[in-house]
Image (tube, rainbow, N blue to C red):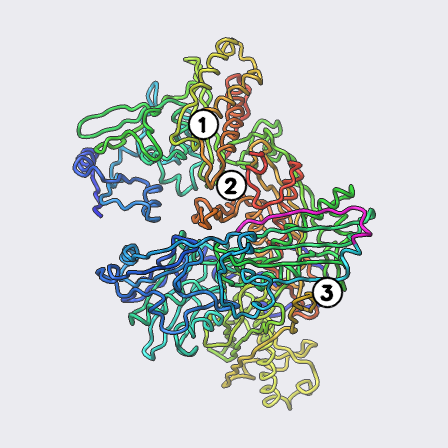
Amino acid sequence: MDFLRPASWEEALAAKAEHPTAVPIAGGTDVMVEINFDHRRPDVMLDLNRIGELQEWEVTEETVRLGASVPYTRIMEHLRTELPGLALAAHTVGSPQIRNRGSVGGNLGAASPAGDSHPALLAAGAEVEAVSVRGTRLIPVEEFYTGVKRNSLAADELIRAVHIKKADGPQQFSKVGTRNAMVIAVCAFGLALHPETRTVKTGIGSAAPTPLRARVAEDFLTAALEEGGFWENGKIIPPAVARQFAELVSGAANPIDDVRGTASYRRHALGVMARRTLGWTWDEYRGNERTQSCA
Amino acid sequence: MGVTRNPTNITQGSKTKGGLGESTLRPDGTLKVTGEFAYSSDMWHEDMLWGFTLRSPHAHAKILSIDTGEALATSGVYAVMTHDDLPAFTKYGLEYKDTPVLADGVVRYHGEPIAIIAADHPETARRAAAKIKVEFELLPLVIDEETALADGAPILHPNRDDHHADHVTHPNIVHRQPIIRGDANEAAKRADIVISGEYEVGMQDQAFLGPESGLAVPAEDGGVDLYIATQWLHSDLGQLSPVLGLPEDKIRMTLSGVGGAFGGREDLSMQAHACLLALRTGKPVKIVYNRFESFFGHVHRHPAKLWYEHGVTSEGKITHMKCRIVLDGGAYASASPAVVGNASSLAVGPYVIDDVEIEAVALYTNNPPCGAMRGFGAVQACFAYEAQMDKLAAALGMDAVEFRQLNAMSQGTIMPTGQKVDSPAPVAELLRRVKALPMPPEQQWLAGDAEGRSIDIRDLPGALSNTTHGEGVVRGVGYAVGIKNVGFSEGFDDYSTARVRLEVINGEPVAMVHTAMAEVGQGGVTVHAQIARTELGVTQVTIHPADTQVGSAGSTSASRQTYVTGGAVKNSCEAVREKVLELGRAKFGTYHPAWATAELLLEGGKVVTDGGEVLADLVDVIEGETIDLELEWRHRPTQAFDLVTGQGDGHVQYSFCAHRAVVEVDTELGLVKVIELAAAQDVGKALNPLSVVGQIQGGTTQGLGLAVMEEIIVDKNAKVRNPSFTDYLIPTILDTPTIPVDVLELADEHAPYGLRGIGEAPTLSSTPAVVAAIRAATGLALKRVPVRPEHLTGT
């Protein structure tokens, strides 16, 4: 196995162009597990840890440009206001040790349907900055996931950063696992209210071959909020609307039975999470929320 | 978390610092917490090779051919061995030798070892293993009682010659134990209510954190030195000797750092393989399983199906009990016969029921082999009988604790085996104690904020996964109590050996304690030092590494080591003390009449009378002498159970623990947070109160794991689906509740210091208490553990 250690981003791109099968590694929380369990034997590895810029982030007017290797711990500590959904998701990643090493770039590179950050990225709205020696492109996150553990990166591309829309309204993230910490999602759900555009966006994790948005549910809720004048009057969302939203979220999933849970439980749990997170975000929008403390 | 002590008729407070009753700290504690403890997997030897095991991908198949040529030709590979290369006897086993060292033309479970490789690097060994070509012919599977006993079922062990072969009703039954007492059918006529139920316990794993590992070093005399993490050195030795074709004195075993055991290290894992490769190559061979392989490398807790029927009068007295317990023993016998003995003889629970019909069997199947795990057959029974107790109480409209207390056994109760319980059995009192504890506050996730506007989601089901802020959350409270035997039962010669040496070093009396007891984390070495200090009145005690240069200590299991090896250390110390006093009488006897007339003790480095008068300095008495004694010690003998009636004084001692569980259940998502799991246990005498509390909390947590998450999932093809800590979940600290422990000390006059073995009892009642609390919160019947979200949501 060749272990390449580029000192700069340019060197990394050149190395990836020269070795298209090279597996990038930063925190190693996913790649090393696969290697240790003998699930993969890369011929070439590309160590990105010498590239400091990947550990940095930049907050602009509209977005946060999050370096691919920024560990979850930093997101929890520094980006709670700008990226509340992602910060909540970061809280549920593995153990403190894993959160000190793991990053959103790694989650995207692995493209596991169970990756914790995906539902939050989908709900917030995000673009993946994919770069190669040929140039840079921004891939909308919903187009990034192409199959189980597959993404739309070309063989010579690396993830440099993720551009995530700053929250313009309340966001929530919920994840079901069969223990109270350090657990892979049985299923997960992210919800973001976007008062500026009077829309809502969702993200479903671990309940289909790829992370996905529940678009029919989003459209239904967006229309229901608009028709009822809820954005202006701030009234409580009628239970029937919340129920319908929850059913549509359940229906958007395409889960399987596996050792972590049954398909029917996943559908059921997504509905419960959709209803609850809608309640929490809407309460917050109405200025009536309870604060959460968990640190 | 206070330790409550009751007055007891045994006073063993030591005047010597660090003696019995003190919470002296474990020597390995800080090292383990800081990551500096050397485990068996950390060993290293110059020029050592790495061993690797090729395992079966199928659960039942004939091996048509094995081609090792390409693997052997791999650069860096020193040896490849299959069944045909074994030098001597080819099988091993705890109770019967039915387990092939390497598959003998057939594989009977997923993961069975087929070939072993030694290479200069673990990766080389792994790659070579992948080059071994094995041709299989798949055979029909035995996966449960129906397929085991069906007409024309494959007979997994066709030529059995074990001592149970003649009395079992089918060759796929390892052992069957009925226990009949009184007349259950006649007694049933007195019942006003009869309740029956069917229960199921999933396959739990010991999930010790230190994987199987060891280092075998070939010796110049043709023997081998094995450094190994195990639970019983001499049992391993007895099984290795015929397999290696070496006399026992040519196999020198030393215990290396053990990272937990819980029963999973009673059977051999890599011991024979490492020794065989070392003897074959003439080089040291180290084998370390990774976590994936570890799930295939040791036996698990028997999954069980249990059918129970109880009758009760309208006044709440239990009239009778009938039960049938079917344990899945998997492909090889391991400890299945003894597990059957425990499950049947403890199936009644800690209750007075005079008329019983009990049957327990263990099956041979193609599922993973199952054997010893903390609680050992009593765990499965306790889950079922405690569920029955709650159902009976509910049917009567009685309080579940009062109903149990009304039927609780006590000292003098006759067990279904006919054995009289001849030491304290404070079952009702333990229940009273856990019930009397204050309840944790309601909705404690709001407790941090007077206005209730701040939520600590760590106190809610799902915790940081942020699944509820209180929605759907219902509290439930449940109780359970259990009974476990202590020590090896059914007539087994359950002895231990202790060597104790006393001498003067640098002007100070120093004792050395040498046993073969496997310290697996239970704290035995701490207790041995405390015993030696108390008995010999010395401060300095050295614990010799455990090895086979001293006689057997028996297994570190069955809650027995403090009792049995502790008893052996006490016994040897007493013999050493007699020698000291003989020396003293010879040297100083003429100076004081008390040498001849008084009861003399060793305390604080001096010989004293029982009145406290100092007669001599210990140093002056033993200066120039070394007292060094090795003695065996035995507890009271037990009897085998009659194979038809189950009658017999089969157990040494019984141990009791009660739990109260308080849970919060997210009833919509089916997620559970155990808020508090209070325990009360009679320990006879707490030799080290801190270790006692630690054992009770640990056992409680392991029982919680079985209640809500821990299960090896085996599919219809008898293949293990979740061999990793990603998918075999054990409790994290966020799953572990507050565990208040109330320790009762009612001495057992038959046991050393009045102590009672404690390690397993808390694992029994924890599981049913948690499930009872979940039932209380949800109103669901919940007949199976672990309880999954699907069971709670009907999905």
Q: Secondary structure at mark 1?
A: loop
**How far apart are labels 3 and 1 at the CA level?**
59 Å
Residue with the mark numbered 1 = A253
Mark 3: give few (<14), some (14-19) or many (20+) Cα within 10 Å. Answer: some
The chain holding disc 2 is: A
Q: Which residue is painted at 55% across and 37% down in the image?
A: B789
**How far apart are labels 2 and 3 at the CA level?**
40 Å
The chain holding disc 3 is: B
**Residue B274 in the image, given as x and y percentages of width and height:** 36, 66
- Name the side, left or right, on which B553 lies relative to B42: right
B191 falls in the magenta region: yes
Residue with the mark numbered 2 = A179
**Residue B644 in the image, given as x and y percentages of width and height:** 67, 66
Residue with the mark numbered 3 = B421
| Residue range corresponding to the magenta coloring | B188-203
Same-chain status of marks 2 and 3: no
